[in-house]
Amino acid sequence: MKTAVLILLLSATPALANKVFVSNEKGNDVTVIDGDTLEVLGSYPVGNRPRGIAISPDGKELYICASDDDLVRVFDPETMQELHTLPSGPDPELFVLHPSGNPLYIANEDDNLVTVVDTKTHQMLAEIPVGVEPEGMGISPDGKVVINTSETTNMAHFIDAETYQITANVLVDQRPRFAQFSDDGTRLYVSSEIGGTVSVIDPATQAIIHTISFDIPGVLPEAIQPVGVRVTADGKKIFVALGPANRVAVVDGDSLEVTDYILVGQRVWQMAFTPDQSQLYTTNGNSNDVTVIDVATNKAVKSIPVGQQPWGVVVAPN
């Protein structure tokens, strides 16, 4: 009898691996979506002005940049109860977890610093001076190189993950917002919101090997503002969120040419794959929804209303 009850309870609770978490910048909450049914499970308060969002590799901790609280708040993804907080420095906006789950590298826009925090001891390990208005954070698949992009300095800073020293500065286009490595670590993609481009960088030489630009018929060039970038595990497709252009660009990973534009919600900002990369979720800040994209066909298959001004999104690991 006890076994039967346990089975019923488990079947009534959506598996963590199917959950999608969306930070709503104006709503001060996180919307949780069932990845199987694509239905909203609920919304939960998470502090003031939540933006960056990440989940630990083991799926046990959900990290939220509570920007106006000057904290990273940590939640249990199953219950959405707050577990503890991490020191972040002022105005944390984006962060990246080491592939092992520790430490956490946080961009502090107001102080021109990257803060490094131990996720186990909850202690600050380092403060790394970078350029003006640091925003984007990326990390190499082997965890050895951290990237920070500074919006006003227009640079991608290469940081040694062990020594916390900057090893290279790469000048990119105006207002770089996001940094994403390919899964094999051979390419780094840096989006530039005002420049309207994505710089493709060889991490071994820190040289820009290509610049991806975008041209959408009927859309003014100044509305094409690249922000979030995601790359399939095989490197064959690069997806770029184009902000007020309300589209996600699909770029061929071999030719680095744009092959498609997917119409999504208004002011598309950040994106996240499902673990099997069959779907891609986008946050659309001005239409207060999330678009679900079928990765194989490059088609938007559903729009899901969430909270006020959705900003970041993460999907629980398998």
Image (cartoon, rainbow, N blue to C red):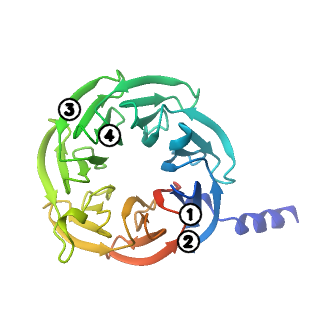
Q: Nearer the viewer, residue 120 or 27?
A: 27
Q: Amino acid at mark 4?
A: Ser
Q: Few, some or many C-alpha atoms within 10 Å of disc 1 (few <14, some 14-19, many ≥20)?
A: some
The image quarter containing residue 140 is top left
> Left or right: 280 with respect to 204?
right
Q: Which residue is identified by label 3? A: 169
Residue 270: give x, y in percent of width and height: 39, 58
* The label number, if any, that marks residue 36 in the structure image: 2
Q: Find residue 243 and report its horizontal and vertical position in percent.
A: 32, 62
Question: Sequence-wise, which precedes: disc 4 or disc 3?
Answer: 4
For marks 3 and 2, the one nearer the N-term is 2
Whole-Å distance between the Cαs marked 3 and 2? 42 Å
Please give the label number shown on residue 18: 1
The residue closer to the viewer here, 145 or 308, is: 308
Label 2, label 1: how far apart the Cα atoms are = 6 Å
Which structural element holds mark 1? Answer: helix
As shown in the figure, which amino acid type bears the numbered disc 1? Answer: Asn
**Pair 1/3: label in front:** 3
Give the label, 4 or 3, closer to the camera.
3
Residue identifier under label 4: 140
Q: CA distance from mark 1 to mark 4?
A: 26 Å
Circles 4 and 3, Cβ within 8 Å, touching? The answer is: no
